[in-house]
Image (cartoon, rainbow, N blue to C red):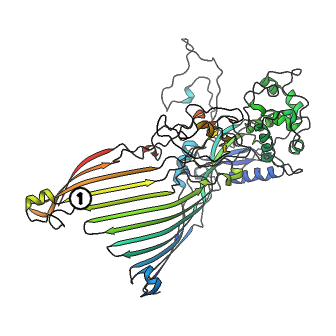
Amino acid sequence: FRPTLTLTLGLRYSLERPIYETQGFQVSPGVQDNSGNCTFSSLTDYFNNRLASAAQGTNYTAPICIVRSGPANNGKAMYNWDKNNFQPRVAIAWSPSFSKGLFHSIFGDSGKSVIRAGFSLTNDYYGQALAVDFDLNNTLGFTSSFNINANTFDTTAGNLGPLFTGFNQDVRSLPLVTVPANLKFPLAQPLDEGERIEQSIDSKLQAPNEYVWNLTYERQFKANTTLTVSYIGRAARHLLARRDVAAFSNTKDPKSGVDWYTAGTMLEKQRQLDVDTSQIASIPFFDNLFPANLVGIMNNDPSVQNDCGSDSVNLCFDPTWTNTQMFYGMQSRGGGGNPTNPFAFFAGNDWTDTQAYIDRVLFRNGFPTRFMQQQYGALSAWSTIGNSFYNAMTVTVRQRLKTLTTDFNYTYSHSLDDASGLQNAGAYGSAFIVNPIRQGDWYGNSDFDIRHLVTASAVWLLPFGKDRSFMRTDNHFAQAVLGGWQLTGIFRYNSGLPETTSPYDDARWATNWNVQADVTPTAPIRACPNRTGTPKLFGGCDVKAIYQSFRNAYPGETGPRNWLRIPGYSNVDLGLGKTFNMPWSEKQQLQLRWEVFNVANYQPFGPIDTSRTGFGVARDPKLRGLNPPTNWSNFTDIQSFAGSTRLNALRVMQIGLRFSF
């Protein structure tokens, strides 16, 4: 448009074929109708149907089935073609020219400054990692469980158990394992409240969208100094994340308008105050959605009697209990040792255990269930449902002098998302959204969020010898001793990364059947590592007071995500070099270098002991006056990068020799 203004426009289009398996082993989930026919259906649709049914007070229990798919089976693709991936780009650069006034002070002389801005829409490529994950981890249609009774084998000759001979051992050679000669599709797990834990891939995937924008001001000053200040933004939608499509329903009572999370939270708050079961008032949610004589159904169920060692005379539960008290009594006071709760394995606020147990009793006695998908306790599936948002300001100062070159960079940033895991993350790992019914609760600091990052580097040609400021001489011996010296340095500091494992309920599952919820702080808590003794994240504070400053999760809660941070990281590398000009030609040089990495030998602690005693929080720590376990919040190793390589290696020195010609 003008000599000082440049506008660039671009458009890219990409089309990627869905990944597929070539030997006919590809299967996809569907929904089975009353006639046993399996209709190809996405797990997104299945999950949405469960949400819609729960909002109406019912439990969507249509069976999930498995159908053959992919080109080799003349079936549907693993996921649909994504044909609308248009990726526009726009960039603008303006070099202001003001001869005087305020703007001249800001932008300088003509050609000394530039303002740049840009925007682009891009799409992530996601097929390759899904192919690897499907090949290694997909369980739907490809796994079977065989249980062999205890004491079937022993150490007596002639009755020895089978030996493990290697990872490629043929399971068909093992005794008591019967492998079907063929598989008849469609396949489906039985509707038996079996609480299976499996994983799959949702067929309603689309290419993740990323919106990137930036604004930069750059100014050249005297003494070859350049200042660059930038704002960078990035928002992403439809990112790959895992969710449990069989998550227990948050069933809503249409009459009272109260859902399970609300009713269950009311009970959990009472439990955390140690209120006796007889004092619990009725909540309409339990009266409206469950049989009137729930306690009688429970007491007369043979499996319940077997679990608590009772019979028709010595009852498991007080027959005068209301439905509300029946739910509460299974968790009150944390289980065994209390006359009102014979179930020692219900350890207080393990509410998914209560949901599952009562659902199973209702199922066995012909009543409608309210919470569980009747085949799976948990079914983790990749879906494109993730979101992220990143904002950053960067400042860069560069100076190029005759013998000194320096760079300084500072970044202040914040990254937020609801799943940070890579496409090869575990089924219930870092990319897993613990409560997909309330996905927004999991939106928080990204696993890789670094607020402050400072880097600086310098190269200094020492001012001695020929063509330098001091001791200039043409004497070859003096030049060989005094000239050609160079000092280099690199400095880095960043503030601490989030501790991706937060303190959690140590042996209870309030919200998700397979993944424990994190506990919630009841007072301001910060990381305070100690400098002496066993290194702990909270070792510099009153560890007992911190341990007692958490409460257990309410039903539906997952706890705050990535709110604690491990120590920051800093490092200094230095180098000293000497360059010799060859006497037969100044175009040929020999350089001797001595370099020291991690000069201070700084080793920041990082990984936390994530075992139940290491970062788990027991039931009601403040109410019961509990002390934390001795290993609670212990650091276990030096900070690592990508899960394997130490970020800060031990101090290393190296000497190098380089010949240039």
Q: Position of residue 548 (x, y in %)?
A: 65, 38
Q: Secondary structure at mark 1?
A: strand
Give the answer, above or below, for where 327 lies relative to 465.
above
**Residue 253 as seen in the image, left or right of residue 593:** right
Q: Nearer the viewer, residue 624 or 654?
A: 624
State how many labels appear.
Answer: 1
Which of 602 and 145 lies nearest the eye of the viewer? 602
Most distant residue in the top direction:
157
363 and 231: which is toward the camera: 231
Pinpoint residue 505: horizontal percent, then vertical percent. Answer: 66, 38
Q: Quadrant of the C terminus?
A: bottom left
Q: Position of residue 139 (x, y in %)?
A: 61, 41
**In the visual, does 257 lie left or right of 179?**
right
User: Do we see residue 8 in this rendering?
Assistant: yes
Q: Residue at x 68, y 42 (%)?
A: 378
Residue in view at x 76 percent, y 40 percent: 374
Residue 406 figure quarter = bottom left
As displayed, is residue 397 above or below residue 487?
Answer: below
Q: Label 1: which residue? A: 486
Q: Amino acid at mark 1?
A: Gln
Q: Position of residue 80 (x, y in %)?
A: 62, 58
As rendered, which of 581 and 162 lies closer to the eye? 581
Quarter location, residue 466: bottom left
Q: Is residue 41 visible?
A: no
Badge 1 density bin: few <14, some 14–19, many ≥20, Cα 10 Å: some
